[in-house]
């Protein structure tokens, strides 16, 4: 197949490399030049996209990220890009469009359990804009679109978590957090090409919701730092995510224990 990546960051790179190894033709579109030898790269603005010279496109992966996390950044990158991309794809008989969104579209914030059948109720402007993007893609490609909603992606670095562990002495409450290893996210995005039937959307998370303060305490133990205290442990926020459709698809996560992964990354840190 000829597979086109619209947006080419770290996740796209991982997926593209795997799909190339399976024998697919890969093209990428990004804001800046790329040099991976397994793909043909194009520098274009997605808001003025031109795919008229491309070989017939079979699959599309849309993985965009805003330059700023502001409401305006989300509107411009996620919502305003849909119409020009759809227009550019009209001359191609696309079989599938995989759009990476976020679990931010689930606005629950009191420790609720969320799975793929949960009602989607964004609670902030950015979540609402992501949901608007999803709906626009589903309207444009009601049969071909697949929406992917990853939770917090980890796996490249623990610098942020180490800094939080160093700077946190008091945590306000019990806040549920969720994560997916970058390799598992890329693996599932690649795995989609092997599925005969697709669900309209998938949560991608590792089935291991954890209170964030417990993760920080683990880092504090490893780094021999003072342990934080939780100010109001009975106050609960966040949500607990379960990727039920991913499980039903037959995909096997390779990273089900984030602490093993964190330990491996810590071992690589300079002492």
Image: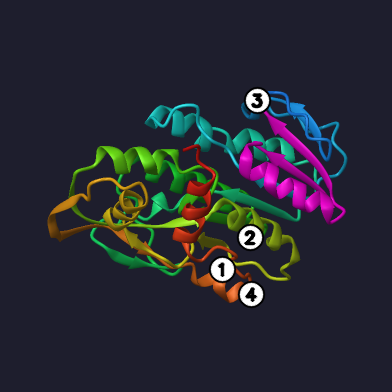
CB atoms of marks 3 and 4 within 8 Å: no
CB atoms of marks 4 and 2 within 8 Å: no
Q: CA distance from mark 1 to mark 2?
A: 8 Å
Q: Earlier in the sequence, mark 1 or mark 3?
A: 3
Is residue 3 one of those drawn in magenta? yes
Name the secondary structure under disc 1: helix
Q: CA distance from mark 3 to mark 4?
A: 35 Å
Name the secondary structure under disc 4: loop
Residue 91 visible within the image: yes
Q: Which mark is residue 250?
A: 4
Find residue 119 and report its image quarter: bottom left
Q: Using a 10 Å C-alpha cutoff, classify the residue at mark 3 as few (fewer than 14 neighbours), some (14 to 19) or many (20 or more).
A: few
Q: Which residue position is annotated with label 1?
A: 246
First to last magenta residue range: 1-30
Q: Which residue is located at x 86 percent, y 44 percent?
A: 56
Q: Which residue position is annotated with label 2?
A: 188
Nearer to the camera, 257 or 102: 257
Position of residue 250 in the picture relative to residue 230 (left or right): right
The percent coordinates of residue 258 (x first, y second) are 46, 59
């Amino acid at each position: 197949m000829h597979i086109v990546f619209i947006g080419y960051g770290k996740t796209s790179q991982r997926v593209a490399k795997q799909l190339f190894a399976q024998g697919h033709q890969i093209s990428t579109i990004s804001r800046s030049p790329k040099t991976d030898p397994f793909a043909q790269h194009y520098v274009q603005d997605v808001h003025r996209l031109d795919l008229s010279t491309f070989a017939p496109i079979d699959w599309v992966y849309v993985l965009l990220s805003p330059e700023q996390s502001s409401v305006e950044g989300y509107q411009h990158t996620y919502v305003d890009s849909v119409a020009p991309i759809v227009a550019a794809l009209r001359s191609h008989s696309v079989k599938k469009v995989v759009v990476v969104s976020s679990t931010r579209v689930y606005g629950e914030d009191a420790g609720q359990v969320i799975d793929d059948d949960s009602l989607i109720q964004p609670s902030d402007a950015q979540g609402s804009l992501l949901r608007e993007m999803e709906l626009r893609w589903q309207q444009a490609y009601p049969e071909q679109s697949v929406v992917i909603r990853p939770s917090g992606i980890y796996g490249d670095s623990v610098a942020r978590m180490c800094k939080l562990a160093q700077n946190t002495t008091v945590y306000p409450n019990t806040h549920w957090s969720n994560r997916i290893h970058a390799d598992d996210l890329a693996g599932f995005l690649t795995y989609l090409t092997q599925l005969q039937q697709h669900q309209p959307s998938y949560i991608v998370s590792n089935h291991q919701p954890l209170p964030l303060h417990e993760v920080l305490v683990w880092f504090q133990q490893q780094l021999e730092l003072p342990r934080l205290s939780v100010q109001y442990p009975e106050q609960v926020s966040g949500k607990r995510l379960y990727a039920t459709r991913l499980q039903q698809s037959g995909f096997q996560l390779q990273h089900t224990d984030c602490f093993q992964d964190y330990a491996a990354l810590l071992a690589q840190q300079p002492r």
